[in-house]
Amino acid sequence: MKKTIVCFGDSNTWGYDAVTDKRFNDTTRWTSLLDVNLGSSYRVIEEGLSGRTSVCEDPLFEGLSGLSYIYPCLMSHSPLSLVVIMLGTNDTKDRFGLTSYNIAQGIVRLALKAKGSASGVDGKAPEVLVIAPPLIGEQYITTPIGKPMGMHCSEKSKELSGHLATLLEGTGIHFVDSKDRVTMNEVDYMHLDEEGHRLMAELVQQQIELIFN
């Protein structure tokens, strides 16, 4: 039976292209590349949503909290071998008022919910991989995205992975920090470009091979 993987994330999982304001095609998105690279023994399901947060309800836009959606999402795609979660970029928005530690707490809460969802094979827990997203570049504040995001997003982004690594210890949840391998674009400094998608696909594939081989 194929191993089914759900990639649960935000616009960088959906495949937002900051140059065109549209979606990268399925020969570019990291999830699509991952599906091809893993071969016929795996099935990769894209569950990316622009603006998605880990646990916060956005006062300006509806339906963006991952916490309220992840259970029905995972159960609808079950049985799953792995859930890949890459969130945190949107959680840095000033309007949520979260510290980097708070953001990590929210991501861990979401990951634990996925781990306890019984969406795995034979109703067991799926494997869960949390990815600390690439760093938000400091220059984001000078771009049009700076106003809606607010201040200090890049600072929170830099601190996030360390908190995640600490909080995930002993949970049985896999973790990888992408910042040393993947960078954001030089347009809004908050989204992956084509090269970023290619590198993310490679990174996630390596982690999957470590988990299952």
Image (spheres, rainbow, N blue to C red):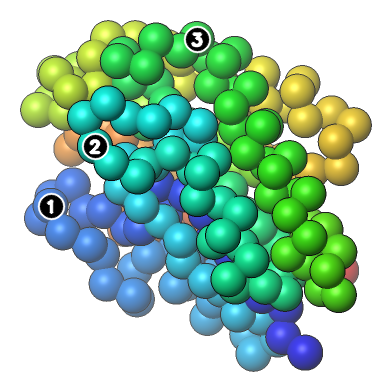
Give the percent coordinates (x, y) of residue 102: 57, 15
Residue 84, visible in the rendered structure: yes
Q: Circle 3 is placed at which residue position? A: 99
Marks 2 and 3 sit apart, C-alpha to C-alpha, by 21 Å
Crowding near the residue tagged with mark 2, few <14, some 14–19, many ≥20 C-alpha atoms within 10 Å: few
Give the amino acid at mark 3: Thr
Q: Circle 1 is placed at which residue position? A: 21
> Where is 114 relative to 107, above or below?
below
Q: What residue is at 22 percent from the left and 62 percent from the top?
A: 23
Residue 86, visible in the rendered structure: no
Compare marks 1 and 2 and give the one earlier in the sequence: 1
Q: What residue is at 73 percent from the left and 54 percent from the top?
A: 117
In the picture, residue 48 is in which quadrant?
bottom left
Give the percent coordinates (x, y) of residue 179: 53, 34
Q: Element at badge 3? A: loop
Please state which of residues 157 and 106 is positioned toward the viewer in this rendering: 106
Give the amino acid at mark 2: Phe
The disc placed on residue 172 is none
Compare marks 1 and 3 and give the one earlier in the sequence: 1
Q: Circle 2 is placed at which residue position? A: 61
